[in-house]
């Protein structure tokens, strides 16, 4: 049972905090990249469709945050998590603090998902040529929202949650945005999405370290629980370094523009966070600089990636 002190804040504010909007960067970045690559490929884009696509992605992300937290409350993991560093690990804490009820959080989350679906249907009607492709991408997104922590599937409890986070907050978002605007499939946004998706997965993985003890007790056997925090360090390192290796390969193959080399300026910082994780993996409080640093790593990488593609427009 939670021992956190109760607080009294407006319901609307508590619901917004529970949805954890600061984490929207992992949605905004791949969608912006999909939009940017479409603009570079076809020379112009439909601004309204671009904005609506970004809005759908954000609504789906906030929805999964809320639904995920509801079912983590129901399983008990967030209630017994004494190592939580909110809002980075252990959920937002709004339920435990008495600011909202679990049902209110679930209803708000499902409402955002339904709104996202409605806007998504409007987008589909505007781009019927690629409707089947977008239905496939959107179907995976809705499936992930509904069953990330929801019985009986509970993806995050079965050691595949990290893969679905990588898939949704990387290749599918970047490719989906590109398909809406360019009305075709292309390898480039898919690869860029993979790079960003790996860094998004690294955020989830490093945040699972402090939660591992409580999650294991609640039966939430994600990859960090399954591997153990000591071995999971190598999984974290892989997701932090693989984007650089893949970028180098695809730059050499001339699939990505040479300007993407700009992102390698961040490599020393990524290595620094890996070293911190390897040193402090067993101490949640000491690990915190790696938690916040991994989020910052994703943000800085996204900014460098966007700049590199703007430069690609002007460079031969």
Image (cartoon, helix red, strand yellow):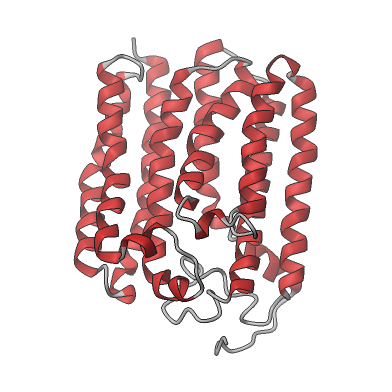
Q: Could you say which is closer to the camera, residue 176 or residue 157?
A: 157
Residue pictured at 44% horizontal, 71% vertical: 216
Whole-percent x, y for residue 103 in the image: 76, 70
Q: Quadrant of the C terminus?
A: top left
Relative to 136, residue 156 above or below: below
Residue 293 image position (x, y, % from top left)? 34, 58
The number of discs equals 0
- The residue that appears at 70% across and 66% down in the rendered structure is 15
Query: Looking at the rendering, which quadrant does residue 74 occupy?
Result: bottom right
Q: In this view of the protein, can residue 12 be seen by the observer?
A: no
Tell me, yes or no, if residue 119 can be seen here: yes
Residue 122 % position (x, y): 80, 30
Q: Quadrant of residue 142?
A: top right
Whether 279 is drawn above or below 2: the answer is above
Q: Give the x, y percent position of residue 54.
A: 63, 37
Identified at 25% across, 27% down, the residue is 248
Q: Is residue 240 left or right of residue 46?
A: left
User: On the picture, is 287 further left or further right than 33?
Assistant: left
Residue at 41% x, 78% y is: 83
């Amino acid at each position: 049972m939670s021992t956190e002190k109760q607080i009294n804040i407006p319901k609307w504010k508590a619901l917004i905090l529970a949805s954890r909007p600061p984490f929207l960067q992992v949605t905004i970045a791949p969608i912006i990249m999909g939009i940017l690559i479409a603009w570079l490929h076809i020379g112009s884009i439909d601004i309204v469709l671009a904005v609506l696509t970004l809005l759908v992605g954000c609504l789906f992300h906030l929805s999964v945050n809320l639904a995920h937290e509801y079912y983590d409350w129901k399983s008990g993991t967030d209630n017994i998590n004494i190592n939580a560093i909110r809002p980075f690990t252990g959920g937002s804490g709004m339920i435990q603090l008495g600011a909202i009820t679990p049902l209110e959080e679930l209803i708000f989350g499902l409402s955002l998902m339904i709104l996202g679906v409605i806007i998504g249907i409007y987008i589909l009607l505007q781009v019927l040529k690629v409707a089947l492709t977008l239905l496939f991408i959107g179907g995976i997104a809705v499936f992930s929202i509904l069953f990330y922590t929801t019985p009986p599937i509970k993806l995050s409890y079965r050691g595949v949650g990290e893969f679905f986070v990588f898939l949704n907050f990387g290749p599918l978002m970047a490719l989906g945005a590109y398909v809406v605007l360019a009305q075709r499939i292309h390898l480039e946004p898919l690869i860029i999405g993979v790079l960003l998706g790996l860094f998004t997965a690294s955020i989830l993985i490093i945040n699972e370290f402090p939660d591992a003890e409580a999650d294991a007790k609640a039966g939430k056997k994600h990859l960090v629980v399954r591997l153990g925090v000591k071995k999971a360090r190598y999984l974290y390192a892989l997701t932090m370094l693989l984007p650089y290796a893949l970028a180098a390969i695809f730059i050499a193959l001339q699939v990505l523009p040479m300007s993407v080399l700009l992102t390698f300026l961040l490599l020393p910082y990524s290595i620094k966070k890996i070293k911190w994780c390897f040193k402090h993996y067993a101490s949640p409080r000491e690990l915190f600089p790696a938690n916040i640093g991994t989020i910052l790593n994703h943000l800085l990488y996204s900014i460098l990636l966007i700049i590199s593609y703007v430069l690609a427009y002007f460079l031969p």
